[in-house]
Image (cartoon, rainbow, N blue to C red):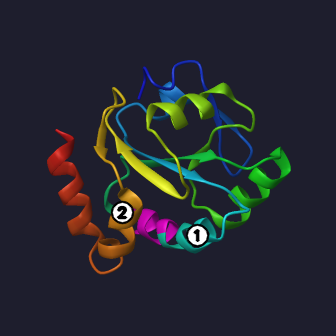
């Protein structure tokens, strides 16, 4: 992810800013495309949060980056701080958001991609996989993803 997030500042729920390339170095990254105004997003976000928290217990190398489709900074921050897991977000208005939407051909939200450090997609529809398999056995789904990762 160093190349993909070089020069991009991310923020966490404490409001701290972190260097994207450094923060994601050595991580298995899920890009989560979502917005506060989107009902299906609001349904999926708690499922992703539970999955994330379960996986992070044994696999600190898992990280999620919130790529917001919100229309205002205040909406992004409220949704992020009140509903999401302890992951990072791209600031409102950052050009990286549009770049990622185009690169990963995100037409609808919520969407989630698991990507390699170079940006190649490992899992195209991680949202569906988390919804269908992530609740019963998060560890098995994680192992399945890692089989494609290397």
Q: Residue 133: x percent and y percent? A: 29, 73
6 sits to left or right of 113: right
10 sits to left or right of 124: right
Residue span colored magenta:
48-57
Q: Nearer the viewer, residue 38 or 60?
A: 38
Judged from the image, the secondary structure of the residue bearing numbered disc 2 is: helix
Residue name at image x 52 percent, y 19 percent:
6
- Choose mark 2 or mark 1, whichever is in front: 1
Toward the bottom, the furthest residue is 136
Q: How many numbered badges does the structure rendering display?
A: 2
Residue located beneath label 2 in the image: 55
Confirm whether the magenta stretch covers residue 51.
yes
Q: Is residue 88 above or below residue 10?
A: below
Which image quarter: residue 3? top left
Q: Nearer the viewer, residue 6 or 38?
A: 38
Residue name at image x 54 percent, y 53 percent:
108
Q: Which quadrant is the C terminus positioned in?
A: top left
Mark carried by residue 40 = 1
């Amino acid at each position: 992810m160093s190349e993909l997030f070089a020069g991009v500042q991310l923020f966490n729920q404490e409001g701290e800013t972190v260097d994207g390339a450094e923060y994601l170095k050595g991580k298995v990254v899920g890009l989560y495309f979502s917005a506060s105004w989107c009902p299906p997003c609001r349904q999926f976000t708690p499922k992703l949060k539970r999955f994330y928290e379960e996986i992070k217990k044994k696999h600190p190398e898992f990280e999620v980056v919130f790529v917001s489709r919100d229309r205002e900074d205040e909406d992004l921050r409220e949704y992020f701080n009140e509903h999401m897991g302890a992951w990072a977000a791209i600031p409102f208005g950052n050009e990286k958001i549009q770049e990622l939407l185009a690169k990963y051909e995100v037409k609808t939200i919520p969407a989630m991609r698991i990507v390699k450090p170079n940006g190649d997609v490992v899992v195209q529809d991680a949202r569906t996989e988390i919804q269908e398999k992530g609740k019963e056995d998060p560890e098995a789904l994680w192992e399945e993803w890692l089989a494609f990762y290397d």
